Image (tube, rainbow, N blue to C red):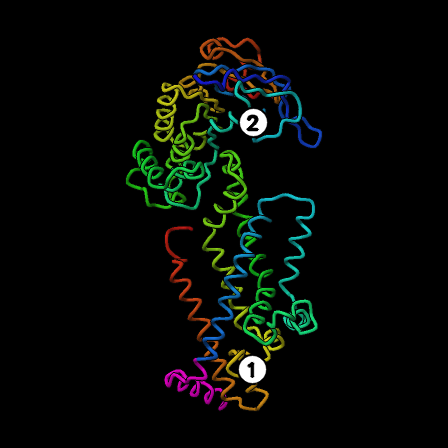
């Protein structure tokens, strides 16, 4: 892969009005595969993703990308739990990241049309994106994040509140991207999804990485009793 | 009541007969108001977008002042513009007093806060919706403003139409800075004021009906051109 990785977090943390939301975190991420962040509500999964992406303010410690933060931001995409649709057509939504990077409209639209075909929205190019179903909107959001060819894709619970079919289609797209070499960093509540997608897992508790490990090892035999309880479906506080 | 009917009837015949004086002041009303609207929108809409996306120390105060200025008394604006443009004023050398340009300047000052405040409400809501996405995409400030203005264009059309309504019906300021000079600065509202002063109520009412008709027509035309109620939920 390219020069974005390794990415290292050294005592990284973010606070709000004196309260530490996430951190301190010490971790190194290599440039391959899919890392899935799991943990109970309020454990800091979304904030950690934003911190790594650079959209949450780092109030302590360091996050170092091998190529520097600015360069790294240029090669990242972010997909939110609730997809944000621009008040434009499907085609214009997917083409937007290319247009703001200065690509000619005709070329951007051609690429966007290809992506729309790929995610099953080829017949809906001129429809307002806001009237799509939840699953279609999330697929559009993923296509929009991937159209610039990011080396890292952050996904914040991308299939929460979606049904099985939409979830499967989205996972299919993610698996294809992972196979192409896109680094996936994703939070989820869905342990089945973590099993299907993860190469390694971070278990977050109270804003800290409580346990981290290879997916099959962690999901098969977690080391801490909190992780075991979480995987069993018990309430972890 | 008879005055109303007489006014309606006279308005009808003035329009049907394409009265030259009516045509002249109607076109001047449109010219002054639409020019003021274009200039005011060019100032107010980017200003509203900037206030929606930028965080700075006195931002709330600026927004509060802008909202308060929506109620700016037109007569006072007219007086201030008069003083600035009068021969002894700082811009007297430009010779703009009692010209349509002076009327445009006064109208721009009156409607900029109105258009900016209404636009700001829409853009602020849209920005809260777009914020995370545009930040995550590393979008520049200029691109953010352009995106917001384009995606909120229909709401902004409503803001501009509110400005149009205020400007076309304005009389106090333009009477002072324009002088209501026949064949030079007379517009529909100042003509209505003049005819009312002369006791010619039927003609004043007729002009009033023409003004209402013009305002409604322009609004409908802009809505139709802007396809405001089409294309889904935009």
Position of B231 relative to A183 (above/below) = below
**Residue under numbered circle 2:** A41
Position of A35 relative to B224 (above/below) = above
Which dot marks residue A149? none
Q: Which chain carries label 2?
A: A
In the image, farthest residue toward the front: B93
10 Å crowding of disc 2: few (<14), some (14-19), many (20+): some
Residue at horizontal 37 percent and vertical 46 percent from the top: A128
- Residue A175 left/right relative to B169: left
Position of A205 relative to B224 (above/below) = above
Magenta-drawn stretch, dominant element (helix, strand or loop)? helix
- What are the residue bounds of the magenta stretch? B1-23
Element carrying mark 1: loop
**Residue B28 in the image, given as x and y percentages of width and height:** 48, 75
**Residue under numbered circle 1:** B181
Give the label, 1 or 2, closer to the camera.
Answer: 1
Residue at horizontal 40 percent and vertical 45 percent from the top: A88
Residue at horizontal 41 percent and vertical 21 percent from the top: A182
Front residue of B103/A179: it is B103
**Residue B82 in the image, given as x and y percentages of width and height:** 65, 73
**Residue A74 in the image, given as x and y percentages of width and height:** 49, 29
Residue at horizontal 61 percent and vertical 22 percent from the top: A207
Element carrying mark 2: loop
| Among the 4 quarters of the image, the one containing residue A107 | top left
Front residue of B46/B114: it is B46
Q: How many labels does the image show?
A: 2
Q: Which chain carries label 1?
A: B
| Among the 4 quarters of the image, the one containing residue B224 | bottom left
Position of A68 relative to B36 (above/below) = above
| Residues flagged by tags 1 and 2 on a common chain | no
10 Å crowding of disc 1: few (<14), some (14-19), many (20+): some
């Amino acid at each position: 892969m390219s020069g974005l990785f390794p990415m290292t977090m050294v005592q990284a943390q973010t606070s709000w009005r004196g309260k530490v939301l996430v951190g301190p975190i010490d971790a190194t991420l290599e440039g391959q595969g899919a890392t899935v962040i799991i943990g109970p509500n309020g454990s800091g999964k979304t904030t950690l993703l934003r911190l790594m992406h650079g959209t949450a303010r780092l109030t302590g410690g360091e996050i170092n990308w091998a190529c520097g933060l600015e360069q790294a931001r240029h090669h990242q995409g972010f997909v939110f739990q609730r997809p944000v649709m621009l008040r434009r057509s499907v085609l214009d939504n997917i083409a937007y990241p290319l247009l703001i990077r200065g690509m000619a409209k005709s070329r951007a639209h051609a690429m966007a049309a290809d992506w729309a075909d790929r995610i099953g929205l080829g017949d809906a190019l001129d429809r307002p994106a806001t009237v799509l179903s939840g699953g279609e909107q999330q697929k559009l959001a993923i296509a929009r994040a991937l159209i610039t060819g990011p080396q890292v894709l952050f996904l914040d619970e991308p299939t929460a509140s979606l049904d099985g079919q939409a979830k499967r289609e989205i996972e299919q797209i993610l698996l294809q991207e992972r196979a192409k070499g896109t680094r996936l960093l994703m939070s989820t509540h869905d342990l089945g999804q973590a099993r299907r997608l993860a190469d390694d897992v971070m278990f977050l508790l109270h804003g800290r990485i409580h346990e981290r490990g290879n997916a099959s090892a962690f999901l098969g035999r977690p080391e801490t009793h909190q992780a075991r309880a979480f995987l069993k479906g018990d309430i972890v506080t | 009541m008879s005055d109303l009917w007489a006014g309606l009837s006279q308005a009808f015949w003035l329009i049907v007969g394409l009265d030259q004086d009516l045509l002249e002041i109607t076109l001047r009303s449109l010219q002054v108001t639409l020019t003021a609207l274009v200039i005011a929108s060019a100032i107010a809409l980017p200003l509203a977008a900037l206030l929606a996306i930028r965080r700075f120390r006195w931002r709330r105060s600026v927004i509060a002042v802008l909202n308060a200025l929506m109620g700016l008394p037109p007569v006072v604006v007219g007086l201030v513009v008069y003083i600035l443009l009068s021969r002894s004023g700082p811009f007297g050398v430009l010779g703009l007093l009692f010209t349509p340009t002076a009327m445009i300047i006064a109208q721009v000052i009156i409607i900029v806060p109105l258009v900016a405040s209404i636009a700001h409400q829409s853009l602020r809501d849209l920005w809260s919706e777009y914020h995370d996405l545009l930040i995550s995409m590393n979008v520049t400030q200029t691109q953010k403003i352009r995106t917001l203005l384009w995606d909120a264009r229909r709401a902004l059309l409503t803001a501009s139409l509110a400005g149009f309504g205020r400007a076309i019906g304005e009389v106090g300021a333009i009477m002072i800075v324009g002088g209501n000079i026949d064949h030079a600065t007379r517009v529909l509202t100042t003509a209505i004021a003049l005819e009312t002063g002369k006791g010619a109520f039927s003609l004043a009412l007729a002009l009033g009906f023409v003004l209402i008709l013009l305002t409604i027509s322009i609004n409908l035309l802009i809505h139709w051109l802007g396809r405001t109620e089409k294309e889904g939920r935009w």
